[in-house]
Image (tube, grey):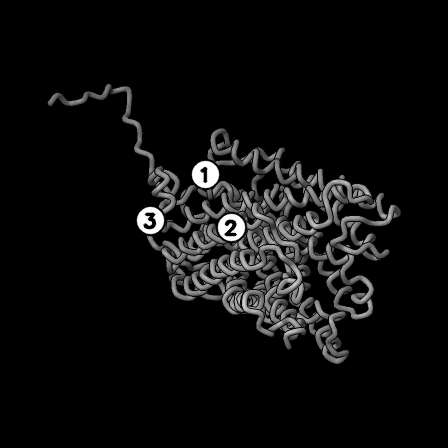
């Protein structure tokens, strides 16, 4: 066989190093993968699809409320639209988005592990999520549900003919996806940390995901059992929640909110961890009061299980119980305030770079603070009685659950996108999207505080004409918000082909995830790293790298 002669002036092309993206391109290799990074990408595609589906229902709601008359859809259709919006956004986007996407990708990288502890269970959790999503899509296409996302009894067990059992089964299955993810994170963080990575050296993103995982594992079975009881009562007419059969509807609310209020922290805690990473990197400082911020995540998870009945001040609980839960609800604000104050202290005398991830971090602090302060108002019994079931409540939980979660998520996506894909995005467009999201969000939901305070009830398809001006402003803001959410999807996809090649550490950031290639190899590290430094060791970075670069 003739040998191949390479001209002296031409070196052979280097063999590209395998990474998780190019190590097998077939669909089968992705659908059967146990690589945590690929599973994170599968989650990214899935939750993005459900986000835009839930956003479509939100668009229908805002278009209906553009005028006082119910002239876009019938009342029962409107009930099904806002129910599907709530179910999809809560159970199929807000709860899984940061843990399943960023957590799945980053937890092993941040602790120096090659993968999660149970790779096959990790893949199973994604399949369970997809099965639940397919089932809720089937419900949507074959009649929908009209109870609201809370499935309140006895309406959900006796008085509606919509697909309660199928929708409950979809949520039940998706709940087990959360349980498996939480279990995987807990075991991985306990057992697979790199040598030298002690608990007081862990990134705050890991602390927040650890606390979130505790809530997932301990709280999700409660709502799963509750939904099973709803199905049993509906199918077999057993007296569990329906008072006509000897049941107690308050029991349902206690069980449902025992999980569903901690679920708020499943949504927000991982985003808080993201913000800690962003502020440390773009202020070039160790997070002020690191240990207090870390322990505040655990405190939020613990307190989250003690405040569920503040959702029930008008449901018939005793005054003494209401006073106790009011006090406890104020107490949960303390660890949340610790984070906000410590982030602010971290910024003091920091070398701040206003890159896109940092803009989202600032946006998170603003929106979460507004949501938290109005949460204290709702924890006050007198105010809560006045504004319960009005748009004040809608605005409050959107500031926390949507504004806070999405600001953290988008900030994290912009920060770690170079690590995930090996490509940079166009910074100017990214900053524009951050501005549109922040302005559009406030224009959409701040008017709803006023609407609720003056008495506009939620879940109504018609309203008095005097409320129209604020509803028009809210709908106009929603259109700006939609543009802000669409832009990142466009330029992220664009960057996959045309974006500037990112180095291993384009932000000069601290953390183990930045000490491997971008994108990372299949098993993350060529050699297991040994940690000999404290978390966020920016004071040890060379002076010429003290200020974080801004992508161009």
Residue 515 visible at all: yes
Q: Secondary structure at mark 3?
A: loop
Residue displayed at 61% across by 46% down: 54
143 above or below 237?
A: above
State left or right for residue 230 relative to residue 31.
right
Crowdedness of circle 3 by 10 Å Cα count: few (<14), some, many (20+)? few
Q: Secondary structure at mark 1?
A: loop
300 above or below 149?
A: below
Number of the front mark, 2 or 1: 2
Q: Give whichever of 333, 307 is nearer the camera.
A: 307
Residue 507 coordinates in the image, percent (x, y) = 53, 43
Outermost residue on the bottom side: it is: 320
**Mark sitting on residue 526:** 3
Residue displayed at 46% across by 43% down: 420
Residue displayed at 51% across by 48% down: 509
Earlier in the chain: of badge 2 and badge 1, it is 2
Earlier in the chain: of badge 2 and badge 3, it is 2
- Say if mark 3 contacts mark 1, CB within 8 Å: no
Earlier in the chain: of badge 3 and badge 1, it is 1
Q: Give whichever of 483, 20 is nearer the camera.
A: 483
Q: Give whichever of 155, 366 is nearer the camera.
A: 155
Q: Which residue is mark 1?
A: 422
State left or right for residue 461 relative to residue 40.
right
State left or right for residue 487 relative to residue 101.
right
Q: Give whichever of 306, 272 is nearer the camera.
A: 306
Residue 147 coordinates in the image, percent (x, y) = 66, 58
């Amino acid at each position: 066989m003739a040998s191949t002669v390479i001209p002296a002036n031409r070196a052979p092309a280097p063999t590209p190093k395998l990474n998780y993206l190019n190590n097998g391109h077939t669909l089968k290799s992705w659908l059967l993968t146990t690589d945590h990074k690929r599973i994170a990408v599968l989650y990214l595609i899935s939750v993005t699809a459900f986000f835009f589906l839930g956003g479509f229902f939100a668009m229908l709601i805002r278009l209906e409320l553009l005028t006082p008359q119910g002239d876009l859809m019938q009342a029962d259709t409107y009930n099904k639209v806002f129910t599907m919006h709530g179910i999809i956004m809560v159970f199929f986007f807000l709860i899984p988005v940061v843990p399943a996407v960023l957590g799945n990708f980053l937890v092993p990288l941040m602790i120096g592990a090659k993968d999660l502890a149970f790779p096959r269970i990790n893949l199973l959790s994604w399949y369970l999520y997809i099965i639940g999503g397919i089932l809720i899509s089937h419900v949507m296409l074959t009649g929908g549900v009209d109870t609201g996302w809370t499935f309140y009894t006895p309406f959900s067990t006796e008085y509606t003919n919509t697909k309660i059992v199928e929708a409950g089964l979809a949520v039940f299955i998706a709940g087990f996806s959360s349980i498996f993810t939480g279990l995987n994170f807990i075991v991985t963080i306990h057992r697979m940390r790199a040598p030298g990575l002690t608990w007081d050296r862990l990134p705050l993103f890991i602390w927040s995901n650890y606390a979130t995982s505790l809530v997932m594992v301990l709280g999700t079975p409660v709502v799963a059992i509750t939904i099973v009881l709803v199905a049993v009562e509906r199918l077999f007419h057993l007296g569990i929640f329906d008072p006509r059969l000897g049941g107690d509807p308050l029991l349902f609310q206690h069980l449902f909110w025992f999980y569903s209020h901690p679920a708020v922290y499943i949504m927000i805690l991982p985003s808080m961890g993201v913000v800690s990473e962003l502020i440390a990197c773009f202020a070039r400082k160790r997070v002020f009061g690191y240990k207090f911020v870390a322990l505040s995540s655990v405190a939020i998870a613990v307190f989250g299980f003690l405040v569920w009945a503040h959702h029930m001040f008008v449901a018939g609980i005793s005054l003494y119980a209401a006073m106790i839960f009011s006090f406890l609800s104020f107490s949960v604000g303390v660890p949340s305030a610790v984070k906000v104050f410590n982030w602010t202290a971290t910024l003091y005398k920091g070398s701040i770079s206003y890159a896109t991830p940092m803009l989202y971090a600032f946006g998170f602090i603003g929106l979460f603070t507004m949501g938290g302060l109005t949460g204290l108002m709702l924890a006050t019994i007198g105010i809560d009685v006045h504004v319960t079931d009005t748009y004040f409540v809608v605005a409050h939980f959107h500031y926390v659950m949507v504004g806070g979660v999405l600001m953290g998520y988008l900030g994290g996506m912009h920060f770690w996108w170079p690590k995930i894909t090996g490509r940079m995005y166009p910074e100017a467009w990214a900053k524009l999207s951050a501005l549109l999201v922040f302005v559009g969000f406030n224009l959409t939901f701040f008017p709803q505080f006023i609407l609720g305070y003056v008495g506009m009830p939620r879940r109504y398809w018609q309203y008095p004409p005097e409320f129209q001006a604020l509803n028009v402003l809210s709908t106009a803001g929603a259109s700006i918000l939609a543009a802000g959410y669409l832009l990142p999807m466009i330029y992220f996809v664009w960057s996959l082909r045309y974006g500037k090649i990112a180095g291993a550490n384009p932000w000069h950031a601290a953390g183990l995830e930045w000490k491997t290639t971008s994108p990372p190899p299949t098993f993350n590290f060529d050699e297991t790293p040994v940690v000999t430094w404290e978390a966020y060791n920016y004071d040890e970075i060379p002076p010429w790298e003290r200020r974080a670069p801004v992508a161009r």
